[in-house]
Image: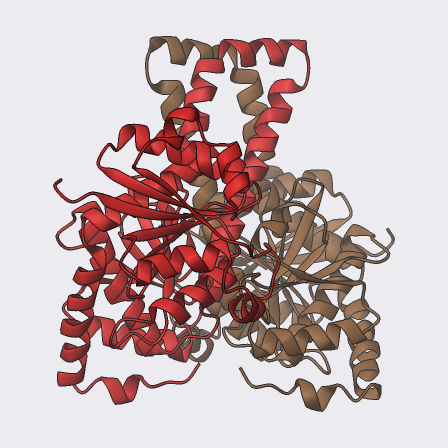
Chain colours: A brown, B red
Amino acid sequence: MAVPQTFALDAMGGDHGPEVVVPSAMRFLGKRQDCRLILVGREDAIAKHLPRWAAHDERVLIRHTSQEVAMDELPSKALRGKKDSSMRVAIDLVKQGEADACVSAGNTGALMATARFVLKTLPHIDRPAIITAIPALEGQTHMLDLGANVDCTAEHLFQFAVMGSEFVRAVQGLTMPRVGLLNIGEEEIKGNDQVRAAHELLAASSLNYVGYVEGDDIYIGEVDVVVSDGFVGNVALKASEGVATLIAQMLKRRFGRNLLSRLSGLVALPVLRGFRTDVDPRRYNGASLLGLRGIVIKSHGGADELAFEHALRIADQEVRSRVIARIEREVEAHLGEARALSLQPSARVSA
Amino acid sequence: MAVPQTFALDAMGGDHGPEVVVPSAMRFLGKRQDCRLILVGREDAIAKHLPRWAAHDERVLIRHTSQEVAMDELPSKALRGKKDSSMRVAIDLVKQGEADACVSAGNTGALMATARFVLKTLPHIDRPAIITAIPALEGQTHMLDLGANVDCTAEHLFQFAVMGSEFVRAVQGLTMPRVGLLNIGEEEIKGNDQVRAAHELLAASSLNYVGYVEGDDIYIGEVDVVVSDGFVGNVALKASEGVATLIAQMLKRRFGRNLLSRLSGLVALPVLRGFRTDVDPRRYNGASLLGLRGIVIKSHGGADELAFEHALRIADQEVRSRVIARIEREVEAHLGEARALSLQPSARVSA
């Protein structure tokens, strides 16, 4: 590529800060020669983890900041009081066009609030949403919203669907991503008012909407995008993480129970290692804040070098696929479409 | 025990009907000499699966019915049009005092609607909820509601907490079950209005309320009861099932990949079998419909003999621990308590 891509990294974010972010960024740079990295944070802390070659590499810039956002800091407090934080400045760099994307392992609430304040939402988008890839039996599923929006109207859910669909088209190269709306199957007339109204909007749209899906469908891979409000999506994702941890612990306990089981575990080690790779959450690290006028990727706070590098790779994919421009265009087209069908007023069911 | 317990079984319910229910019931009876079973359904279909000894055993009764509720039948249709269904008559037997509990693997919506119509809710309980045990790293967690109530007010959530806590006290023998309220951690002021208002009610109550929990806490076992609305609870449970299936498939694929991995799987077979037992969902089959004036247990529709027997064992536990009388007393005490604290009006936040 002729024009190098520039990523602004919140080097102080996450549980480990520059200790993880800096080496991880250097690994990434080793594989992507045409990128530039701006490491944002306390200069001395960053320099401590920078290899000698990088200190003289023009692709690596350090942007010193004097503040940091704590992992448990209130978003409003971070937004008002931390204008020179590594998180804020990394986002500012995207706003100013100095970086093509920003990656942070910091406090999710603060990141969302700051990104929204600095970058603003795209036209027709009321609220940004958080999307991530999830492993499935066949390929992968993308799910949104994962916690940015507690109560959602039908229109919000529809906006999420449009954004999620175009996101998957852009980064996965699918032509007609299958979109499902998360619901439950127990009620006579399924779901709540918002979900039912969103179902009507989606069914009337030109999206490849396949209808309602249930919690277990997320992991089957027969849909590409699963849409829900942020409360439900967050609980589903965290419950899934909980089950995966439980199962891993049970497997470990079983194989460690006695000498014989430890020996058989040793024999099965290559297989068990392969399996661990299959379910390694680090391979899915990196959630995107969608609906903003700029690319912001949230890495898991506890991410290690491998996981953080994956978040960087997602940022890279999004820049290359020009995801923001594509989403902006699709949102315009689909919300125009919904309006033409006069569906919007009936969809204004308050949460 | 002096007085034998009687269980009414919907023999036609579930994906397999009497083919599974009848042999499963006989296995259960072999272990619980002091029980009586009423097998409700088409006499010829039941008789076909009844062993010879059981046909002459006075502990086994067949109650013939002419109708069945289909697994996909609308609850309202089942309720109006199927008054001689195996499901309805099994519940009627509880109402009439001829059975101490009813177990059905039939359509959840129809079972809930019929049970609610026939048995009615306990005083102070607006809506029944569905509760089940879930495996956790340490012991097990009980979770409710799992899909009976899509939108819940703070009062409903509070009622669920009181019922769930007393349920666990009764069946698990815990003195002070730890109760958690399911929420997400991303928002500045966590959760939605209903959850926040329920939090206030719970914090002011004499329940052993430990505060908010997140999706992954369900599987850790540091709380005994997790309370949520039925939409969120259902999605969390189904997503968890989906992950467990995904992981099992991945493990299977890995061990089947080539000759070497198949051989190492053979060596590890005893351990893998033990592990499969650990995560066997059949060992947790049987959800209880709480808040009714009678014991109704819902078995998974696809339950096999082992799984259905577990649902019967749960019914047995509930009868022996007199769970309904205990819940009725606790609900009276706690809702009286909430009223005395004048918390009820402020908790009337509509969903």
Q: Is residue B341 at all visible to an observer of this figure? A: no
Please state if A95 lies on the left or on the right of B240 as rendered: right
Q: Where the C terminus of chain B falls, by quadrant?
A: bottom left
Residue placed furthest toward the front: B56
- The residue closer to the viewer here, A42 or A115, is A115
Please state if B178 lies on the left or on the right of B303 as rendered: left
Does residue A192 lie above or below A226 as drawn?
Answer: below
Quarter of the view holding residue A213: bottom right
Count of picture labels: 0
Does residue A173 lie above or below B127 as drawn?
Answer: above
- The residue closer to the viewer here, B213 or A184, is A184
- The residue closer to the viewer here, B197 or B143, is B143
Query: Residue B248's x, y, as percent?
Result: 55, 32
Query: Residue B34's x, y, as percent?
Result: 21, 36
Query: Residue B277's x, y, as percent?
Result: 42, 28
Residue at 16% from the left image edge and 47% from the top image edge: B173
Query: Residue A241's x, y, as percent?
Result: 48, 47
Q: Where the N terminus of chain B falls, by quadrant?
A: top left
Does residue B287 lie above or below A88 as drawn?
Answer: above
Residue at 34% from the left image edge and 74% from the top image edge: B156
Residue at 17% from the left image edge and 84% from the top image edge: B339
Quarter of the view holding residue B242: top right
Q: Is residue B65 at all visible to an observer of this figure? A: yes
- The residue closer to the viewer here, B300 or A67, is B300
Does residue B22 lie above or below B219 as drawn?
Answer: above
Residue at 64% from the left image edge and 25% from the top image edge: B253
Quarter of the view holding residue B254: top right
